[in-house]
Amino acid sequence: MLHIAVNAKSKKVVSFRITRGNVHDAKKFCPLVREAVEKYNIDKVYADKAHDNRKNFNLLDDLNVEPAIEIRRNASIRATGCPLRRDEVLLIKKLLHLM
């Protein structure tokens, strides 16, 4: 399986991993982001719901990178250990409530 990180503007691959087919994308998120941040000035990371977890949000917070990760529908605001993710969940729930 090919896991890639792509520059959204240039569409160039900035990091990649090749794994066996049974390795979930979320397992390769941290190494891809770390490698990309070492090589490039990364200010925001986009990802789907598969990457919505505390470990990934904490990494982005540590690297001072803005998360643009789709939040799972059943995400709880009571989760501890990741203030950045909690803030994102609260923001999404408020925005959905206004609609």
Image (cartoon, grey):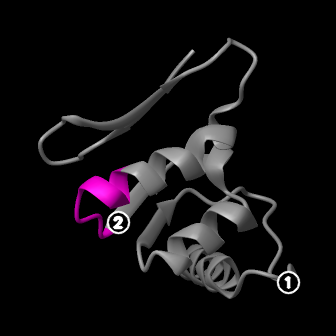
**SS at badge 2:** strand
Q: Position of residue 49 (x, y in %)?
A: 63, 48
Which amino acid lies under the numbered mark 1 shown in the image of this protein?
Thr
Mark drawn on residue 91: none
Q: Position of residue 25 (x, y in %)?
A: 63, 34
Residue 48 visible, this angle: no
Tell me, yes or no, whether the highlighted magenta stretch contains residue 7. Answer: no
Q: Which residue is found at the position 34% from the left and 59% from the top?
A: 38
**SS at badge 1:** loop
Q: Is residue 9 left or right of residue 81?
A: left
Q: Is residue 48 above or below residue 78?
A: above
Tell me, yes or no, whether the highlighted magenta stretch contains residue 42. Answer: yes
Q: CA distance from mark 2 to mark 1?
A: 23 Å
- Count of numbered circles in the view: 2
Q: Position of residue 18 (x, y in %)?
A: 53, 19
Q: Which residue is found at the position 66% from the left and 76% from the top?
A: 85
- What is the magenta range? 36-43
Q: Is residue 90 above or below residue 17?
A: below
Q: Which residue is found at the position 81% from the left and 60% from the top?
A: 74
Which quadrant is the N terminus positioned in? top right
Q: Which residue is found at the position 18% from the left and 36% from the top?
A: 11
Mark drawn on residue 80: 1
Q: Position of residue 86 (x, y in %)?
A: 70, 82
Which amino acid lies under the numbered mark 2 shown in the image of this protein?
Lys
Of labels 2 and 1, earlier in sequence is: 2
- Binning the other alpha carbons within 10 Å of mark 1 as few (below 14), some (14 to 19) or many (20 upward) gives few
**Residue picked out by circle 2:** 44
